Amino acid sequence: MGFHRRHIDNEQVISIYLERGTDAVIDWYTKGVDALVLETGIASDIDDILGLANITIADKNNQISDMLFEASTQIEG
């Protein structure tokens, strides 16, 4: 077994969202990884939301989905 570090940048997060949705983005942060290296911006903001203990999983999902939708519309339009 090794140590798995994942580098995540803003463009990558938006691309995953557009291709596979919010659940795929959350999986990218939480499955099969020991440490994250994040770009400043939406990539690190998503990790901040996932780390919140005082809101439900559904609320986290909704906040992340809203952020990703907004970011993707800025790129597309």
Image: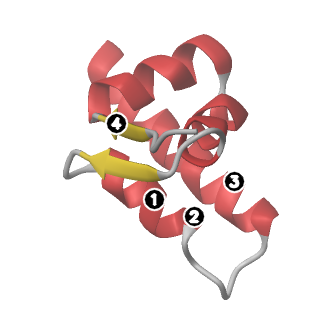
User: Which of labels 4 and 2 is toward the front?
Assistant: 4
Question: As displayed, is residue 31 above or below residue 35?
Answer: above
Location of residue 17 in the rendering, given as x and y in whole percent from the top left corner: 55, 25
Mark earlier in primary sequence (4, 3): 4
| Quarter of the rendering containing residue 48 | bottom left
- Residue 5 has which mark? none
Answer few, some or many: residues within 10 Å of disc 3's Cα (few below 14, many 20 plus, some between 14 and 19). Answer: some
Q: Residue at x 50, y 51 (%)?
A: 34
Pointer 4 and pointer 3: residues touching (CB < 8 Å)? Answer: no
Cβ atoms under marks 2 and 1 closer than 8 Å: yes
| Residue labelled with disc 1 | 47
Q: Is residue 3 left or right of residue 58?
A: left
> Looking at the picture, how far across and down is residue 59, in whole percent?
72, 66
22 lies above or below 53: above
Badge 2 is on which residue?
A: 50
Disc sitting over residue 61 in the figure: 3
Q: Quadrant of residue 6?
A: top left
- Disc 2 marks which amino acid? Leu
Spatial distance from mark 1 to mark 4, Cα to Cα?
A: 10 Å
The residue where tag 4 is placed is 8
Q: Nearer the viewer, residue 69 or 19?
A: 19
Binning the other alpha carbons within 10 Å of mark 4 as few (below 14), some (14 to 19) or many (20 upward) gives: some
Furthest residue to the front?
A: 1
**Type of amino acid under label 1:** Asp
Closest to the camera, between mark 4 and mark 3, is: 4
SS label for mark 2: helix
How busy is the neighbourhood of tag 2: few (under 14 within 10 Å), some, or many (20 plus)? Answer: some
